[in-house]
Each structure stands twice: as C-alpha cells, then as structure tokens.
Image (cartoon, grey):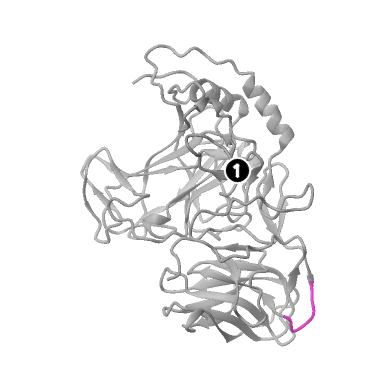
Amino acid sequence: MRTAKRVIIGAAVVAAVAAASGIYLATASADEIGAGTKLEAEAWSAQSGAQTENTADAGGGKNVGWLANGDWMRYDNVSLGGTDLTARIAAQNKAGGSIELHLGSPAGELLATFPVAYTGGWQKWTTVTAKASRVPSGPQSLVAVMKSAQQWDFVNINYFTLGANGSHSSATATVAPPSTAAPTTGAPSTAAPSASAGTPAAGWVDVDKVKWQQELAAFNAVKQLPVPAGTTRVAEFHTDCSVSNEAKDDPIVLPGLPGASHMHTFFGPTVDAATKTADLFARSTTCNAKGDNSAYWVPQLLLNGQPVKMKSFRVYYGSRLADPSVTVPFPPGLVMVHGDAKRQVDTPKGATGQFWCAGSAETGRSSDGNWPVCAPGGNLIFQLVFQDCWDGQHIDSPDHKSHMGPMQNGQCTGKYPVAIPNLSFMVNYDSLGGNGLSLSSGMASSMHGDFMNAWNPDNLGPLVKICLDAKAKCGTTPSFTGG
C-alpha cells in the first residue's frame, strides 16, 4: 500500500465550460498522429482516481499512479492498428489484478485484458501484452478500467501501444501541466491555475463576475432585522430534504458519463450524469426551504449489499467565523465536494470522520471496529462539514475542492478571502449500525458529499443577511427561533 487517501480529479485534457452552469466538462481536442506511436497513460480525456507523477522509466516524463480497483481513464479519438497490444506497468502491491480495455465507457464492450503482477516496485517497469478481441474500425473512445480483488493501489501505467500500426490522439497545448512533484496524501493543491489571459486552466471555472456583482448588490440592499430577546444566538438556518433519486451518476466529478460512478443518494431535484446547475432551477425539489433548488448527494449506505433507508436529511447553513457578519451568499453556479471517496482506512472508536449514534448511546462496535452499534431508540448518523471560505474567483476546480479552503484563526483570508455559508450535512439512516455495513464507495472513511448551488438569490440573500450575519438562529425562513 502506498497511500490510502487520494483525490479524484475530474479530467486533465481540455475544459469546456457550459455557459449557463459552470460545470466542468472534459473534451478531447487532439490530432491523430503517426502509426506505431505510444498512447501516454496521462493523455486521458476523462478519468476517475488517477494521478500523475515523475517516472523513472526509460524516456522520463510522467506515469499515472495511485490506481486501485474501479479507477479508470478514458481516451478519445483512438485507432487500433492491430490486435497486438501492450501496456507498460509497474507494481509494488503483490495482490496484482488486471487492466481492462473497454469501448466507449467503463461498462462498454470488453476489448482486451492486461495481466498485472508484482514487478518489484512502483518504478520497476515491465511490458505486458494482450490480444484485442477485434479491431474496431476508425477512431474510438477507449476506457482503461482497473480490476483487483483488494482495495489498495495496485498498478502504475506509463503508456500503451495499440497494435503494430496503432495511433493515438495527442493532447494539444491546452492540456493542464501536471505537477512536477509526486502526489501527496494531504489536502489538494491550492496553487493558482496558470492559463493564457481570459482562459481558465483546465478544470478551473471562473465565476460570472457580472452576475455575481449583481447578486452581491441585491444582498447588500437587504435590510437587517432587529433580533428579538430570546433568540438563540447561533448563526444558522436549514433545509430539510427527502430522497429525490439514486443513481450511479456524479455530474460534478463525472459529468456526462452515466453509470460511471458508485451509487449515490440524491436530495433536492432529480439528478443524473448530465445535470447542470441551470437545469436544477426548472425542476421540482424535495427540499422544504423556499427558493432552494440546490442538489445534494452522498454515497449510498448498504447493509449486506442492500440499500439502507434514509431516516432524514438536513443541511445546516451556518458560520463558524469569529465575525459571521462578513458572510455573503454563494456565488452563482458554485459546485463543491467534501470528503474523499478514495479514502479507505479503518475508523475505530475515537477516530476522526466517525459515523455515530443519534438519539441513543453507542453500545459497541462492529466486528471490524468501523461502525458503531446504537441502542434501541436511536439511529446511525453522519455529519459532513464543508469548508468555510471561497477563493472569490472560481466556481469549480480540477478536484472540485481547491477553490474552497479552511478559515484561519476564525477568518477567511489569504487564498480564500471570501466567507460563504458553511454547509453541514446531517445524514440520518434507518439503522442501528453494526455488522454488514458499507458505503457504495467502500469503507466508512470514504464518506463524502457533493453540492450544486441552485438557490434563488432573492431567498438566499435574506437568510444570510438576517440569520447568519446577525448570528441568529432561524429555521427554513428568515425568522428567528429560540431554544
């Protein structure tokens, strides 16, 4: 095992921004090049779970690493020149596995399978071969899917060759330059993106500044109300939502790729892989705060492989800043992810990121120690708390996290100077915990949440000004509550 925590990055080739939504879409902008050349593993058009690092293999450059079961990389505009295929791989994990080549999508037709076995190290390279079941005519989309019987990283890939006369697409100069350092296991990089003037780097989506300034002006015009005696002085309001749908889709991390994700439970409007923020405003919602058409989702909870029913889902909007009066509404089109679907580590009692018992005491732990056992009358719950601060420039980033950041000494400052409402998902399950539980993304430690902002500014602005800025507790409307 090299690391148990990795960041999912949406795509590494050209970014196309849907004007109305701000969603980052991976597309290929490439030319077909000469026969017999190599398909570099990092030249994906879209991917899940992959990261690049400097390679010690002959020729240098980059290889793709941190690949585990279920990770995949899609390559567009690829032509096969024959049935003889090769993959240049390295593996330190003795569990091994395979690399499958599929047509079109991760679940598409299986074209070939490369065996993966221990090579002696993550930079000990060897070439493995496979036979294609057929040679499709013309350019294709090929998806390399990682398969292993265990959960940890098991293979690095430097490049493929696709037939004696094979050819592949070569990314243009619009490809985002990969990091020159090996990936880390900590927080994603917050370095400012580099791009030519007026063009965001791949994966970085600029806020619509004109629309944002208009919304800020309307927010600043909202009149603060006097806070009556007896009001609980906590910066808070909330929305309650029921399940809208469940699907193996993720329109933030894997836009336009239906069925490519693990199963998610969605709240608010109905969501699929093609959903954009603009779509949400036209759909009905299961959330009860007026003006909230935002979408929220988490991985599905399973008991012995079967879905566990939700008991309730509440999103608290608050402020943890020393001075919450600086908080402003979300910018239009903001999307963000919190947590790490690839984090697969034990969560014994006392560990951070715990599922816990609401309404009753914890009476024990599951046999693997990762799940609490709740006394009758209670239920299993998870609280997922997002970041407090925004960079003020981007509504999305390559990992869907790097445009957001933590407060420092109670303030939003430095790279993240703008205070926005702090989201807190309270995810309640109809379960007492115990044995047999898992998430669709894996272990309890892989819990994560996604948010697409589709609040009506006319409703969100008063909630932020009257409740959060005044450090006063509200419900689903800008009216005060006590107790």
130 or 281: which is nearer to us? Answer: 130
Is residue 76 left or right of 67 when viewed as pictured? right
Whole-percent x and y of residue 165? 75, 85
* Predominant SS along the magenta part: loop
Which residue does the image show at 36% across and 47% down from the upper left?
309
| Residue at image point 48% right, 30% down | 288
User: Is residue 160 depicted above or below 482 in this figure?
Assistant: below
Q: Is residue 36 rendered magenta in the image?
A: yes
Vertical placement of residue 200 versus 285, above or below: below
Q: Position of residue 482 (x, y in %)?
A: 37, 19
**Residue 17 visible here:** yes
> Compared with residue 297, is residue 208 higher up or lower down, i.e. above or below?
above
Task: Give, as a three-letter code, the residue at label 1.
Answer: Lys
Question: Going 45% across and 69% down the picture, which residue do you hit?
Answer: 2
Q: Quadrant of the C terminus?
A: top left
Q: Is residue 106 visible?
A: no
Circle 1 residue: 415
Residue 297 lies, in percent from the top left, at: 49, 46
Q: Is residue 205 magenta?
A: no
Tally of marks: 1
Q: Quadrant of residue 145?
A: bottom right
Q: Give the x, y percent position of residue 416.
A: 58, 41
Quadrant holding the N terminus: bottom left
125 vs 192, left or right, is left
Instruction: Name the quadrant containing residue 260.
Output: bottom right
Disc 1 is placed on an element classified as loop
Read off the magenta span. Answer: 32-37
Q: Residues within 10 Å of mark 1 (few under 14, many from 20)?
A: some
